[in-house]
Amino acid sequence: MLSSFWFDCDSTVQTLYGNQEGAFRGYNPDYPGKKSYHPLVVTEAHLKDCLGGFLRPGNVHTADGIDELMKTIFSLLPHHNRLRFRADVGFYDGNFISLLRENQAQFAIVARLTSLFKLRVGGLRYYRISPVFSAAEFHYQPHGWKKKERFVVLRRKLPKEPTDSQTTLFTLDRYAYSVIVTNLDLKPYNIFRFYQDRSAQERIVRTLKEDYPFGKAPTNSFTANTLYTELSLLAYNLVTWFKRLCLPNDWQSFTLPTIRHRLLMMPGEFVRSRNIPTLRFPRNNPYQDAFYYAQERIKKLLPLV
């Protein structure tokens, strides 16, 4: 059993081109003005499993529904495990952070910078990490929040041609600033390193959208499309656990299309030998060893209780 769970939360936009129920104009950076769905998903960073998610109309806020989803996830986990949560600025909310605290969860969430924030970070005392990076921290209680929180700031010296950074929210003079609100007992720079590992979440979301019907609209009914979305999360988890439990180590990084092509659609035929049906593959098939390996591993699996 894992000694800690690291939750990564994200929303994504699925652009639609018909008149599907629940398709509305909302935040759509790739196709501004187009109708879309706005699904939400929470994954676990160590196992790469999807712990929960659901389909939402295209005009909802990024964090809409995250409170109830996390309450459900928390209720299913062992209470003695260490919990950590990472999310972008869309989940920066005082009530949600209070929920995380109530469940003894540590968090690192990108802060939404107001004009007051921008004035404050410019006057902080920074300590040098490298010729490029320096860091600082301060405590502040935003309006409507229940208590002061710790904010850590990473300042990056801009090159002649600035590069993009996911957590960079604004620039001032010759520096770019990124701010995270956190209760982690880590040095500021280590908190940013911890947050940057969240990039694996983006690969999972991309896999869900490309290889599974996550967020798609195969029908005009929002309820039916919601079911498709949740079934796609189940299918993703089944394939993930199938790879983990049944496939060789060098197959762990393979995508669903690769597994389907090499293993599930491998040509073969049943022949009778001494009146016993036997599955045979073409001679010198490069993937039959993996097939037999998976077959033996499946035989050893125990049923869920």
Image (cartoon, rainbow, N blue to C red):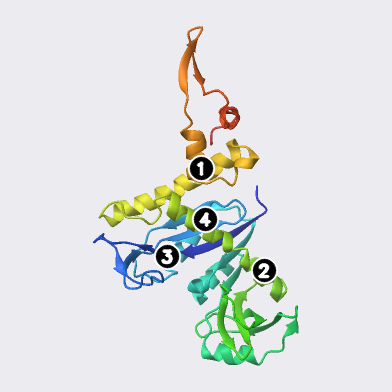
The Cα atoms of the two marked residues, 1 and 2, are separated by 32 Å
Which numbered mark, 1 or 4, is in the foreground of this view?
1
Q: Nearer the viewer, mark 3 or mark 2?
A: 2
The amino acid pointed to by label 2 is Arg
State how far apart marks 3 and 4 are (Cα): 20 Å
Q: Position of residue 24 (x, y in %)?
A: 30, 68
Residue nearer the viewer, 259 or 19 = 259
Secondary structure type for disc 4? helix
User: Sequence-wise, which precedes: disc 1 or disc 4?
Assistant: 4
Q: Local crowd at mark 3 within 10 Å, few (<14), some, or many (≥20)?
A: some
* Residue drawn at the location 50% of the way across and 61% of the way down: 70
Would you name the residue on which mark 2 appears? 193
- Rounded to the nearest angstrom, the CA distance separating label 1 from label 4 is 16 Å
Residue at 48% in and 73% down: 90
Identified by mark 1, the residue type is Thr
Q: Earlier in the sequence, mark 3 or mark 1?
A: 3
Closest to the observer: 264 or 221?
A: 264
- Residue beneath label 4, please? 204
Residue at 48%, 53% in the rendered image? 207
Q: Which residue is mark 1?
A: 258
The amino acid sitting under disc 4 is Ile
Query: Residue 22: x percent and y percent?
Result: 29, 63
Q: Position of residue 249 (x, y in %)?
A: 65, 41
Q: Specify the amino acid type for callout 3.
A: Gly
From mark 4 to mark 2, how far is it between C-alphas? 19 Å
Residue on which the image places disc 3: 65
Of helix, strand and loop, which one carries label 1? helix
